[in-house]
Image (cartoon, rainbow, N blue to C red):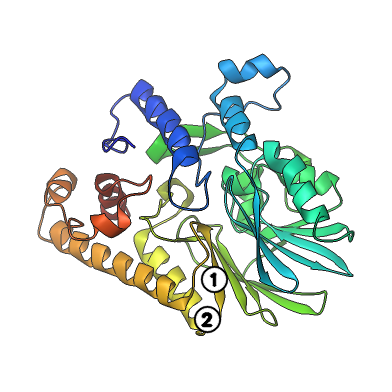
Amino acid sequence: MNSTLFSRPSTRRELLRTGTAFLGAGVAASVAPRGLFAYRQPRSGNVQQAGAAATDPLAQMRAQMAAVPLETLKLRDNLFMLHGPGGNMVVLNGTDGKVLVDSSFASVAPKLKQSMDALGSAPLKVLINTHWHFDHTDGNQAMHEAGATILAHENTRKRLSTPQTVAALGMHFDACPAAALPQLTFADAFKLFFDNEELSLNYAPPAHTDTDILVRYHQGNVLHMGDLWFNGTYPFIDASSGGNINGMIAGATRGISLADGETKIVPGHGPLGDKAALTKYRDMLTTVRDRVQALKSSGKSEQDAIAAKPTADLDEQWGKGFMKPDFFVTIVYQTL
């Protein structure tokens, strides 16, 4: 992957070029699962012709993601992690029906339905969105049309129902159709009792975005962190959606407090993890935050802070994903 992928683009054309490269990088990323992450070019509605993919970056991305295998990992007897394209998903399967967390890309919907059908014949009843980003919600409409009631934080509905811009990547998103919007929302916490499982949904104050929630399965001892956790890499923080580094640290700390040594923790992107791995991630975020804060407080400009390479000793472990060190330092600096 190009080591300068996230050097700050200075023109609109460079922003778009960076975004397109970012999308391709997500498909090729070596950090499991594949199809790691994607923020795309402007949303332009359903693809009407196959040839549209040649000129429409969004159509091209959907086509790429449709080709990424969707894999199933058993977490507990009735809990499964689905991973590959887009953000990691979790399915609760039982006689009452199925509950799905996140919906990946619209182009993945046929595979997603097939994977869920392979777990049992009970219908999909509920879809939970961990936050608004497209790689976690593009399949919402297909899942709703398959019978799911969509549940999310109230800010997720607000953002999906209005045009959005991810300024750091120069990308704009039109409002979603009504069928893709959450029908149930909450402000702080929500309890769902389903298939002999108790699910606690808890809002995390602005972190990756201002729409993030954690989903805890009490009986199964599983925790879905959404994009509060990028396992094994520096995370993307969407400042345009209210995200900031201190919120990311607080969100990770909240996840740690909800876990024990046996908890299986699902990140938004990256392999299945545990409390020890999440703690290492939180500690890395804290170290970077403190170093960048010291540079900023001493009067260093953003470019000076980047030039100081405050993550140099961490990059071997955390800097091999799509989020390059200089760009991560940029986001941390800007959100302090």
User: Dot 2 surroundings within 10 Å: few (below 14), some, or many (20 or more)?
Assistant: some
Q: Which residue is mark 2?
A: 259
**Residue that appears at 53% across and 81% down:** 258
Which residue is at 23% across, 60% downward?
Answer: 314
Provide residue 274's location: percent of width, then percent of height.
Answer: 49, 74
Is residue 23 at least partly visible in the picture? yes
Kind of residue at disc 1 = Ile
Q: Is residue 84 above or below residue 197?
A: above
Expressed as whole percent of the image width and height from the top left, the position of residue 127 reads 74, 57
- Alpha-carbon distance for marks 1 and 2? 8 Å
Quadrant showing the N terminus: top left
| Pointer 1 residue | 265
Mark before the other along the chain sequence, 1 or 2 = 2
Mark 1 and mark 2 in contact? Answer it, CB < 8 Å: yes
**Number of residues whose C-alpha sits closer than 10 Å to that of mark 1, classed few (under 14), some (14–19) or many (20 or more):** many
Q: Is residue 257 above or below residue 306?
A: below
